[in-house]
Image (spheres, grey):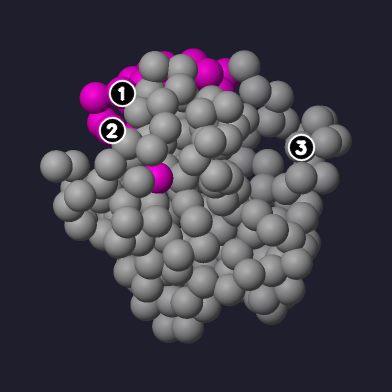
Amino acid sequence: MTACKLCWEDGCVAVARGNGRDFLHCPACDLVFVPEAQWVTVAAERARYAHHDNVVTNQGYVAFLGQVADVVCGVTAPDAAVLDFGSGENHVLTDILNGRGRRCRAYDPLYGLGGDALLGKYDLVVMCEVIEHLRDLRAELARLGGCLRPGAPVVVRTQCYPSWAELSSWRYARDATHINFFAPRSLEHAAGLIGRTSQATQLPDIVVWR
């Protein structure tokens, strides 16, 4: 049997298959994940993102990140220390938050950015479209938790998965670099690993762990 990447429970079973990948479901925490043997390489993941237009001149992308920045600024004070965990090569969200008066640092191991940033303590950590990529899910969450000051929240943006019948054709699951898929219960479990509770916001794909 395959153990869950999030809660380590055995008994995960395939509930869908698409694009050469199996999607395993954990009945204990509701995580859906792709088995490691079917992951793309880190080099292939980096190559895929080289084709994305994730730059400050892309107005649609900036507007998308602006929604996250609004949530971050709504739960932090000006001059708060913020870590952009999985910032991307161009760290656009980092720059947006710095422009809004937060002291934000970028961290992204895929691009060798900000390794020393993990030595700091922060008033908030933000993960925008990141948690679905994490290969060692529990270890990365522990690393994130170690960066938080007492009571500091985490802002997470990811899409929760649809029904099993829709899973294999779902746009989010067709991205070969996405290997973790969450339901509200699995987001709650992930938050609990770092001593937080997952709370919904007005936007369906953004939650705040407090």
Query: Residue at position x 28%, y 42% from top?
Result: 13
Please give left or right for residue 164 compared with residue 170 in the image: left
Mark 1 and mark 2 residues within 8 Å of each other at the beta carbon: yes
Going by the picture, which residue comes out furthest to the bottom? 151
Going by the picture, which residue comes out furthest to the front? 165
The N terminus lies in which quarter of the figure? top left
Under mark 1, the amino acid is Gln
Density class for disc 2 (Cα within 10 Å; few <14, some 14-19, many ≥20) is: some
Going by the picture, which residue comes out furthest to the left? 1
Q: Is residue 165 magenta?
A: no
In the image, 120 versus 149, the foreground residue is: 149
Element at label 1: helix
Please give left or right for residue 178 compared with residue 63 in the image: left
Query: Residue at position x 76%, y 45% from top?
Result: 64
Under mark 3, the amino acid is Tyr
Density class for disc 3 (Cα within 10 Å; few <14, some 14-19, many ≥20) is: some
Quarter of the rendering containing residue 75: bottom right
In the image, 48 versus 120, the foreground residue is: 48
Query: Residue at position x 65%, y 23% from top?
Result: 52
Q: CA distance from mark 1 to mark 2?
A: 6 Å
The percent coordinates of residue 79 (x first, y second) are 67, 72
On residue 38, the disc is: 1
Under mark 2, the amino acid is Pro
Number of residue marks: 3
Tell me the residue that label 3 is attached to: 61
Residue 88, compared with residue 144, is above or below; it is above
On residue 35, the disc is: 2
| Mark closer to the observer (2, 3) | 2
Q: Which span of residues is magenta-colored?
A: 32-50
Residue 29, compared with residue 89, is above or below; it is below
The percent coordinates of residue 123 (x first, y second) are 53, 74
